[in-house]
Amino acid sequence: MTRRILFLYLTKHSGHYAAAVAIEEAARASGVPVESRLLDSFSHANPVLSKVTLRAYLTALKAAPEIWEWMYDNPALKERTALIRELLSRGNSRKLQKILAEFRPDVVVCTQAFACGVLASWKAKTGSQQPALVGVLTDFVAHRYWAHEMVDLYIAPNDATKATLVAQGVNPERISVRGLPVHQRFLQPIDKAAVREWLGFKPGLPVILVMGGSLGLGPMKSVIRQLDRLPQPFYIVAITGQNEELKERLERRGGKLRHPTRILGFVENVQELMEVAELVVTKPGGITTAECLVKRLPMIIINPIPGQEAKNTEFLLARGVAVQAMTATHVAQFVDEFLRNPEKLRWMRAAAAEVGCPEAAAAAARDILRLAGHAPARAALAEIR
């Protein structure tokens, strides 16, 4: 029997999208017949509001990040905004109902909490047990907007997150601890020599990877300037994502740098760049750092977004797979220290091997396919256990 799966994410080229694609690919590779669709739930339901919200979010992060920190996982704010969220949910659910009627999925997989809440509210109001609803967390922690009675299954990254969901009222039998899903391409062998040749880098010298997420956020320009002052020989690869302005600014400066530097925009082969890197300077998005863990790549974290990225940072620091730099100068100091003492990098790589979950996407896909093959949905949970 063909399983029909609808994946709902938020924003293309985001961690939410990457997680959905990873699980979709794993489901298709499982041998079980699958028909699937991926949908940007917010953009589909409210294209104008989606753009306005993203713009407001970025403005808040740049101008007053403390506002976002206050909003994140705030129980009082959740209670006070219940009516607003309910109105938004109604508007979104009407359009999503059309998709459900047209595609008739056995299971809806949400990799972002808002979409998950919309479907959970719709199921509660209609009393419908179908389709099954799965929430896939894409950070190492769970904020309270994830918790809903009508979610049939949660895919959680770790036991601590499971405990948080349980404390928020989720039945522990509805939580499967699998890790954060990364795409199969991060598990495949890579020809390092070929990647270095593509980059124009000679063998032998270390590669420092500098990333700013899909939006190219953070002080990347300052980081590269400080790295270029270090005396050790090494290469730099900078990935600016969709930030074309930053890419152009870095390219103009690139010819003046002492260390050979490749400036890249949005790339589809980040797994290859991680493979040849000695370490990475990055923002701590959940899926990005999960990919680093699978690649056993030590991380220097800088400029985490208050809220989910700050919590991700705490998780990664506690497990010894990353260090946090407060400034670009601090980044250069860490790089200098690591290059002078490679034993620390070897220790961090070993720690990353312990924390990473390379089979998370495949395990999540198996859970979802089992759930999709049963009705009513919750009857399948015993088999997943």
Image: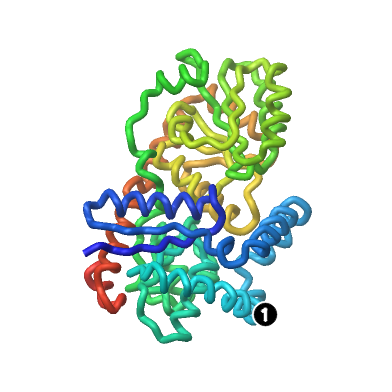
Please name the residue that numbered disc 1 is placed on.
80
Find residue 364 and report its horizontal and vertical position in percent. Answer: 33, 58
Visible residue check, residue 344: no
Find residue 274 and report its horizontal and vertical position in percent. Answer: 47, 33
Q: Residue 59's quadrant in the figure?
A: bottom right
Q: Quadrant of the N terminus?
A: bottom left
At horizontal 57% and vertical 67% (from top left) the residue drawn is 45
Find residue 191 and report its horizontal and vertical position in percent. Answer: 36, 24
Visible residue check, residue 347: yes
Residue placed most toward the observer, 70 or 185 = 185
At horizontal 63% and vertical 49% (from top left) the residue drawn is 304
Q: Quadrant of the C terminus?
A: bottom left
Residue placed furthest toward the front: 102
Residue placed most toward the observer, 329 or 294 = 294
The total number of labels drawn is 1
Q: Is residue 182 above or below residue 84?
A: above
Disc 1 residue crowd, few under 14, some 14–19, many 20+, Cα 10 Å = few
Q: Residue 110's quadrant in the figure?
A: bottom left
Question: In the shown orientation, is residue 76 left or right of residue 323?
Answer: right
Color style of the picture: rainbow
Question: In the shown orientation, is residue 57 left or right of residue 158?
Answer: right
Q: Is residue 36 above or below residue 248?
A: below
At horizontal 60% and vertical 39% (from top left) the residue drawn is 241
Find residue 265 and report its horizontal and vertical position in percent. Answer: 60, 34
Q: Secondary structure at mark 1?
A: helix
Residue placed most toward the observer, 117 or 203 = 117
Q: Residue 222's quadrant in the figure?
A: top right
Residue placed most toward the observer, 67 or 378 = 378
At horizontal 71% and vertical 55% (from top left) the residue drawn is 55
Task: Say which amino acid is labelled 1.
Answer: Arg
